[in-house]
Amino acid sequence: MYLSLIQNAALLVALCSFYSLISRLRRDRELLTRILEGLLFGGVAVAGMNMPFQYAPGIIYDGRSIVLSLAGLFGGPAAGGIAALVAAFYRFYLGGPGVWAGLATIAGCTLVGLTFRRAFADRPERLGILSLYGLGISAHFVMLACQLLLQPWPAGVAVIHRIWIPIMLIFPVATVLMGVLLGSEESRIVAEHDLMDLTAELEKRVGQRTAELENANSALEAFAYSVSHDLRAPLRAISGFAEIIARRHRDSLNEEASHYFDNILEASGRMDELITNLLEYSRLGKKVMPPEAVALSPLVAEILSESGSGQTAADAEIAVQPDLPVVTGNRTLLLQVLSNLIGNALKYRRDGVRHRVEIGGTIEGNWATLSVSDNGVGIAHEHHEKIFNIFQRLHSRDDSAGTGIGLAIVKKAVEMMGGTVEVESIPGEGSVFRVKLPAAVTSGNEGGEDEKKSRYSAR
Amino acid sequence: MKRKAVILLVEDDRMDIELTLDAFREVKLENEIITVQTGEEALDYLLGRGDLADRKSYPLPNLVLLDLKLPGISGLDVLKTLKKTPVLKRLPVIILTSSQEESDRAAGYDYGVNSYLVKPISFSGFLEVVKNIYDYWLTLNVKAPLWN
């Protein structure tokens, strides 16, 4: 008797393992999973019928009542129905005088399971121990009733009389144990599936949000682009005609009018610069720039020779490290980055100090760092993040000319090349801007090519 | 006496027209400048449609200054038609636009424009452009033979 008890217990544990294995698939293939579950429960019920345990000589019982009530509870109508059918077919095949009582037990226990499932709103994992015990009691009450009513009279009465106490003592407890096992599996699976649903939902939302952002971004770029073009036409008229008056009719203007015309010209010049920068910024996102090895030294030399003649470089000491790194990036983007950084470094000066700008670079592993530092006005710590946002100017318009787009261009261009830009600055002492970019592979021909190029451009 | 070179200016913006004409006056160029404000008018004039067929009153220009952003038929469409029309395809066309867009530049040259200029923002810029156009396209450059 103990051996067969252990056998039955092992069978039920196996049921749990297989159940958890199959049920994992439920999220994607509900029907298939339910069919497999039904076959599993049915198979276990059949196996249980093949290893019954003997309570007393001639009185043999098996665990099918437990299995089928739990099949109804956990598997629902589809799996419970299939399990019941499998078990019923087998019981019918076995035949014998108890066949009708056996079939009725199979149907009854499954129905009890289904009823409990319905009562708990299809969430069988929420049944507590007491409810499971109630299920066990109900299922085995049904079983005894079937035996009583359908066994040949009066043999049934005699049998029931002998077995009802042990049945009602042992089987509901076994049902509870099995139910707890299956229930914990079920709640784990449900939790897992909830998590998967959440993850999928989250991914979907992230995808949607990304698409929205991309749309908004490209709409913004298109907007900036068309604004830049359409703003130019009236600006051209304003500055063009103001210039004609200032050139041709200067003599007939009094001092005030003459001064105001100069103001108009100056303001339209600034507006033109603003539009140029805005256009540049909006154009940045429009094109795919293929990465190439770019030597920074000739680029810096080019920028300095252009700005050298202008006012910005006047009276400043500029120190450039002789061999700046060769980086992987794009020449056009790098030109924008460098000219903005160097332009800024030359622009924001402190009174009473000889202005000094240093340009240097290092290579560390696969990364090159370029630094542009100055001893100018500096930037307060709370502004260090903000300055890279578009239209973020820290100085009043009269202090220093600037459009508020330069550093936004720098940041966007650097990020397009897979790099980062950061600032270190103390107000009243100066600023250092560091651009980190992937270093170019300098071995082989590439480096040589670059050197050749820079030699040519130096001539 | 030889007639002075005639220029057709295709430009929809009244201010830009005035600036261009003024620049021509300022550098003392007395070329006849015919102004049209749409692509359709430009094609009507160049193809001599309707009343414009009389080349004595409406002479074929020696040079076309063409804006790209025009209402209706765009500057690029005008250019495309010109370069496909046998009698007009040797006529030098200069795009004068505010667009520096790569796509516009590419299309302009693909359709066979002879020169691509960006409208300057200042009047002195206009003077320079006009002078250079005159010096190069109407003086230095050797004209293509007329189509027979």
Image (tube, coloured by chain):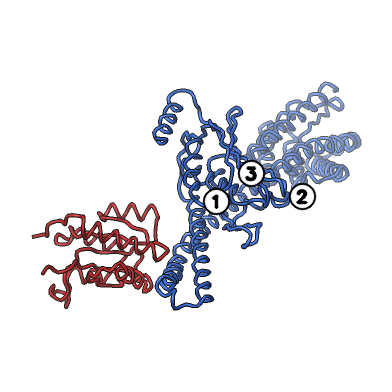
Chain colours: A blue, B red
Image height of A96 relative to B28, above or below: above
- Name the residue at 27% across, 69% down: B28
In this rendering, does residue A105 appear at all? Answer: no
Residue beneath disc 3 = A374
Instruction: Tell me how far mark 2 sits from mark 1, CA to CA.
Output: 87 Å
Q: Which mark is residue A312?
A: 1
Q: Amino acid at mark 2?
A: Thr
Residue beneath disc 2 = A115
- Which quarter of the rendering shows the N terminus of chain A? top right
Front: mark 2 or 1 = 1
Is disc 1 in the same subunit as disc 3?
yes
Q: Amino acid at mark 1?
A: Thr
In this picture, residue A335 sits left or right of residue A174: left
Q: Earlier in the sequence, mark 1 or mark 3?
A: 1
Q: Earlier in the sequence, mark 2 or mark 1?
A: 2
Check if mark 3's residue and mark 2's residue have beta carbons within 8 Å.
Answer: no
- Which quarter of the rendering shows the C terminus of chain A? top left
Check if mark 2's residue and mark 1's residue have beta carbons within 8 Å.
Answer: no
* Residue A229: percent from left, percent from top: 44, 63
Q: Amino acid at mark 3?
A: Asp
* Residue B126: percent from left, percent from top: 36, 64
